Amino acid sequence: MNLLSRFRFVSLPVLVSCLIFLCALCGHSSAQDFKTLKDGVEYAEVTREVSGKVVQMNLLRLDLSKVRLDVHHAMDAAIGTEKTSSIAARHGAFAAVNAGFFRLDTSIFAGDAAGLLIIDRHLISDSTNDRIVLGLTNNKLVTEVAIGRSELTHFLFQGKREIEISGSNRELATNEIVLYTPYFHRTTLTSKTAIELIVRKDRIVKIVRSIGSSEIPTDGYVLSASGTMASELTKIARVGTLIQIGQRTHIISISHEPDPPKMEYFEDIVAGVPQLIKNGRVDITWEQEKTTKSFVETRHPRTAVAKLKDGKFLMITVDGRSETSGGIGLQDLAEYLLSLGAVDAMNLDGGGSTTMFVDGKVVNKPSDKEGERKVSDAILVTLRNPKK
């Protein structure tokens, strides 16, 4: 019997078993890789070679009818940092990943979100650089998610005057007007060069000059200005003057939505950078979102999220900067997410921030020497029916 004829007698079950084994060696995340941890929560750990280096990945696949998704900021304020695991534990979450980019320094403003951040429909931070956002709404029966772009600009209106506000809940820079709400801090943390209007019920109740760091009323807000914009604010600085804050929003694009919902529809919105996949095709918009080619191509630890064809939601972390995991570029990450069935996907903060928390512990290997990094905010997964 020749070799060819011998192959004809290999049984189909044996052949299938061999193929399954070979697929497992390739490291692709298939059905058998995911294990069910809770009703609606599937988890996988994947090790595979990507562009010549071994990488370790952690994946959560979520049934949005069985879980809630919420964004929470560190210390439940607009500034400050906290470990992803701590944010999750404080809020009783089953799982979590780190979320948006943020100011990472040793100043009192550390943790200030670098992009649009809305939590429970309260503005924490304004949009920047036309960057991709994730919108979340927890309805009674299912959590809705959208990945797209939305610009938000605030204006101060007084009579016929209209003044554009530079930003919200962040450090005041020269020649700016910044809006401070109770979600920022107890005070504005500004310098003595600022002029500040304390507003309650749409009326100026107090004007503060050359003192700074005014207390923010719990039932109002503070407008703080410096440089040339201080002169603009001075023109309307009269106690009792009626002023209003308005906003203009522009939904640039949400995949699969010819008539996208307004920003107010979403409970939580968090920004990332950049878009990875849109409408089932790799589309990395790094130039539009004003990041660098190096950021896209360099192998970093990464955190990303994706909407899948079957309606489920995927959260992924990729470890890096270690001997056991080499990190990943965004092109490779996008292609891998596409192979898992992603129709829309976006990149979140990565590097030393990359963290996945599941069932009481951090399951990935953060790259900072000190271990898990304190971050600005996190996406939390809460079970709708914890008993299952």
Image: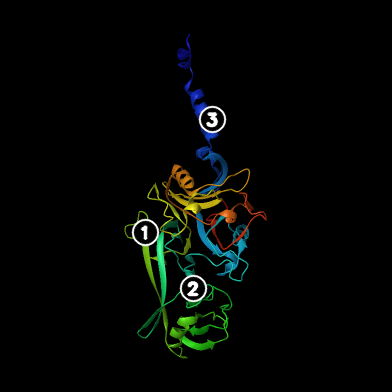
Using the numbered discs, state the Cα–Cα distance from disc 1 to disc 2 in whole angstroms. 23 Å
Q: Which residue has dot 2 on it? A: 168
Task: Give the numbered dot on residue 21.
Answer: 3
Q: Nearer the viewer, mark 1 or mark 3?
A: 1
Q: Amino acid at mark 1?
A: Ser
Q: Amino acid at mark 2?
A: Ser
Q: Is residue 267 above or below residue 16?
A: below
Pick the residue in front: 181 or 309: 181
Give the total number of marks visible in the rendering.
3
Q: Residues within 10 Å of mark 2 (few under 14, many from 20)?
A: many
Q: Is residue 289 above or below residue 51?
A: below
Q: Is residue 325 above or below residue 12?
A: below
Q: Which residue has dot 1 on it? A: 253
Query: Residue 121: where, in percent of width, then height?
Result: 47, 68
Pick the residue in front: 371 or 263: 371
Q: Amino acid at mark 3?
A: Phe
